[in-house]
Image (cartoon, coloured by chain):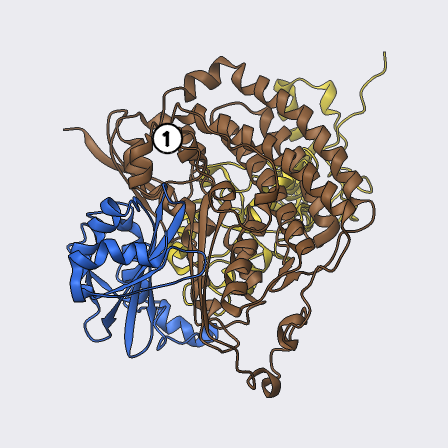
């Protein structure tokens, strides 16, 4: 019987997120913990013991933050809503061919369970205040992806009387995805871009 | 009194798009409903007045994003009538090919979303997988997955790539076998019948009074289909049956759409056989230069304004996957249409929501609205 | 059904209020009528001619006047018929068709808010596509499209 490979909490020079091979940025040296060999009850004391001296030395934010970022970027829960055409490609990305869930991306219907809002379509002035409400209902930390040309800058409807020329007029946007609509690959690429941003997140 | 109004939408898993269903409830019973639309109103009719005839095609794809080619077809027929132009026969067959592919893709998208609404999870994956096969075929000759801009006033943009018809036949055979499995998954499931049978009943008379068309009308026992009743393009030369049921409920609409997909396969086989045998031009000769060019230079006022095109009115009606779509194009002689008016089938189908929702329970709303197949893009335009 | 058949049924009842029945490609005809005759015309089109299905209602702004058109369908004849009437621009008002064809309800709401045509006795004339309180009529020719920066003034207030 082979022993399973240990899951790392943090270890420099080893990629943690599946598929993202960025060099680790400004990571403190954290002791190696074999989670698989620990029971849940034993995990927290062990982690405290291992991290405690480090936290005392370097400060809590610097040590916990990479762990927090690692967990956050591998379980991005986007808001489940469809604005326009891009919503169909958004749905296609969760279909059998692209399977976005392998990146930990699971759409949730309640904004209170979400940490990323994918604005997948044309935003009109009529829906603008509803979009802001949904954004404010999402718990911190939260991100916004503007998917497609309409959400980025109005797209083909830029001159229309009822269309917001870009969702960044309403909420801060972290990642823009070009395309009308973007292919599912492009949407997944945008999510990986967002993971890079989260990886470098400090405060 | 425990009556109250609740909002389902604009962000709700039931809506499949941006719209709000205000529901008046007493406990679980639905007393009244009031659909609130317009969250995706992009003013397509107004922007069209500012565009050239070929540039409006771009907006048509985005108008109904699950059936873009059917809407292109609709607009193209109307504007050809308004401009007094005719497309060659091969282009007409290519348009029928597009429209039937689009019907399959749209119904598969509906299948994926609807069946997930009633609690069956794996059909979503099956529906999306088979839809991607259709989109691959469309992509091979239009270049895009969803927004095609393939049809042109006076024909279509390009001909089929080599080997296309053989690939199509393979996909059609594959789909034909898959539809058996689809039916087993749904009709063989108790959950499906408990959540769908006898719900959302809308009888034929109410359908006609409230302007309801498409699979909803055909599920009420009225075999009305514009492809047969008022043939456009080359539908009068193709053999197919009109799918209809008589239960007028959610299950009936499911059966009608599944049968429509089988009939689409039948039409597509005839069309690809015809396309194999009849090569030819796909664009009309003698087009005005600004119209024939795929991308007319917009800023070149010099030759754009020196035309005196005869005025005309164009009307067209197309059996879109959701129902009966119409376009009315007013040509006043300029390079832009003077007025474009579209009739969306889903617009009328939702406007009758009071008729098929009142008296049921709140938990019945997702299957009933799922069976309407809402595409908000074409409702709000 | 030909334009003559349509006018043979409608002319005796409407008299001079029926202006003309013109031929129209792909349709049974285009019926031009005085706007005051709407309530007499609609039931006859539905019951006597058999056009039981109203497909759409729309409006056109011809600057000096406005036009309201109705498209109806007959299941027996498998044909469409276009009804059209002119209303003056300073008093754009016509009787509602929703008493005859219930499907006119939403189409007239849309025509009211986008083209600015008032429908008398409409049961529920409120905004459908534009937000409540939106005061512009976008499909009028006088409403020009602008770059978004100028446009925000027009739309932002809602």
Q: Colour of chain B?
A: brown
- The chain letter under disc 1 is B
Return the residue nearer the eye: C68 or A140: C68
Q: Which chain is yellow?
A: A
Q: Quadrant of residue B199?
A: top left
Q: Residue at x 59, y 56 (%)?
A: A148
Q: Colour of chain C?
A: blue
Q: Residue at x 53, y 69 (%)?
A: B83
> Judging from the image, what secondary structure is the residue with disc 1 in?
helix
Return the residue nearer the eye: A71 or C10: C10
Q: Residue at x 50, y 25 (%)?
A: B255
Q: Which residue is mark 1?
A: B365
What percent of the width, then of the height, locates residue A123? Answer: 47, 57
What percent of the width, then of the height, locates residue C87? Answer: 23, 70
- Local crowd size for mark 1, using a 10 Å CA cut-off: few (<14), some (14–19), many (≥20): many
What percent of the width, then of the height, locates residue A37? Answer: 74, 19
Q: Is residue B191 left or right of residue B88?
A: left
Residue extending farthest to the top is: A1
Q: Is residue A25 visible?
A: no
Looking at the rendered image, the quarter that the C terminus of chain B falls into is: bottom left
Q: Is residue C102 left or right of residue B240?
A: left
What percent of the width, then of the height, locates residue B364? Answer: 37, 26
């Amino acid at each position: 019987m082979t022993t399973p490979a240990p899951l790392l909490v943090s270890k420099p020079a080893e990629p943690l997120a599946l598929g993202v091979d960025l060099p680790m940025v400004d990571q403190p040296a954290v002791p190696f913990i074999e989670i698989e060999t620990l029971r849940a009850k034993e995990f927290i004391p062990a982690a405290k013991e291992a991290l405690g001296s480090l936290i005392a030395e370097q400060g809590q934010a610097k040590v916990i933050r990479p762990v927090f970022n690692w967990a956050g970027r591998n379980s991005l829960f986007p808001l489940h809503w469809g604005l326009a055409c891009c919503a169909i490609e958004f749905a296609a990305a969760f279909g059998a061919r692209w399977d976005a869930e392998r990146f930990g991306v699971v759409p949730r219907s309640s904004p209170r369970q979400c940490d990323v809002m994918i604005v997948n379509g044309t935003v009109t002035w009529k829906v603008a205040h509803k979009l802001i409400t949904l954004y404010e209902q999402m718990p911190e930390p939260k991100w916004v992806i503007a998917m497609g040309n309409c959400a980025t800058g109005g797209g083909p409807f830029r001159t229309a009387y009822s269309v917001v020329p870009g969702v960044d007029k309403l909420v801060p946007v972290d990642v823009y995805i070009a395309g009308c609509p973007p292919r599912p690959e492009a949407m997944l690429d945008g999510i990986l871009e967002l993971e890079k941003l989260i990886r470098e997140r400090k405060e | 009194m425990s009556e109250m109004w609740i909002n389902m939408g604009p962000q709700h898993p039931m809506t499949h798009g941006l719209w709000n269903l205000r529901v008046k409830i007493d406990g679980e019973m639905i007393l009244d409903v009031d659909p609130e639309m317009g969250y995706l109103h992009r003013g397509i009719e107004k922007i069209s007045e500012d565009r050239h005839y070929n540039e409006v095609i771009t907006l048509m794809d985005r108008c109904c994003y699950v059936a873009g080619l059917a809407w292109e077809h609709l607009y193209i027929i109307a504007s050809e009538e308004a401009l007094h132009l005719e497309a060659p026969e091969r282009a007409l067959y290519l348009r029928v090919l597009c429209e039937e592919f689009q019907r399959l893709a749209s119904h598969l998208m509906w299948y994926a979303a609807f069946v997930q609404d009633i609690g069956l999870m794996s059909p979503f994956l099956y529906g999306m997988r088979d839809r991607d096969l259709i989109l691959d075929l469309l992509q091979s000759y239009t270049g895009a997955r969803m927004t095609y801009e393939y049809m042109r006033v006076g024909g279509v943009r390009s001909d089929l790539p080599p080997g296309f018809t053989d690939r199509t036949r393979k996909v059609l055979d594959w789909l034909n076998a898959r539809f058996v499995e689809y039916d087993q998954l749904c009709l063989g499931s108790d959950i499906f019948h408990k959540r769908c049978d006898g719900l959302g009943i809308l009888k034929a008379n109410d359908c006609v009074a409230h302007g309801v068309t498409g699979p909803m009308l055909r599920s009420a026992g009225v075999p009305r289909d514009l492809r047969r009743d008022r043939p456009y393009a080359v539908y009068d030369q193709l053999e197919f049956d009109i799918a209809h049921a008589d239960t007028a409920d959610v299950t009936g609409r499911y059966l009608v759409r599944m049968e429509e997909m089988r009939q689409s396969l039948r039409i597509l086989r005839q069309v690809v056989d015809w396309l194999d045998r009849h090569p030819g031009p796909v664009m009309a000769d003698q087009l005005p230069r600004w119209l024939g060019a795929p991308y007319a230079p917009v800023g070149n006022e010099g030759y754009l304004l020196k035309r005196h095109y005869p005025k005309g009115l164009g009307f067209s009606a197309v059996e879109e996957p959701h129902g009966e779509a119409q376009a009315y194009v007013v040509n006043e002689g300029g390079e832009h249409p003077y007025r474009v008016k579209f009739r969306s089938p889903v617009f009328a189908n939702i406007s009758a929501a009071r008729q098929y929702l009142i008296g049921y329970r709140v938990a019945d709303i997702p299957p009933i609205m799922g069976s309407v197949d809402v595409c908000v893009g074409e409702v709000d335009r | 059904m030909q334009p003559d058949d349509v006018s043979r049924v409608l002319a005796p009842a409407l008299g001079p209020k029926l202006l003309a029945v013109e031929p129209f490609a792909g349709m049974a005809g285009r019926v031009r009528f005085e706007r005051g005759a709407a309530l007499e015309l609609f039931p006859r089109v539905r019951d006597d001619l058999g056009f039981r299905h109203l497909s759409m209602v729309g409006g056109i702004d011809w600057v000096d006047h406005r036009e309201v058109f109705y498209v109806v369908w007959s299941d027996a004849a498998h044909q469409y018929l276009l009804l059209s009437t002119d209303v003056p621009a300073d008093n754009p008002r016509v009787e509602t068709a929703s008493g005859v064809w219930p499907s006119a309800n939403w189409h007239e709401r849309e025509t009211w808010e986008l083209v600015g045509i008032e429908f008398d006795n409409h049961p529920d004339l409120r905004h459908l596509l534009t937000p409540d309180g939106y005061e512009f009529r976008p499909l009028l020719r006088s409403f020009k499209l602008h770059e978004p920066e100028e446009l925000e003034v027009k739309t932002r207030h809602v």
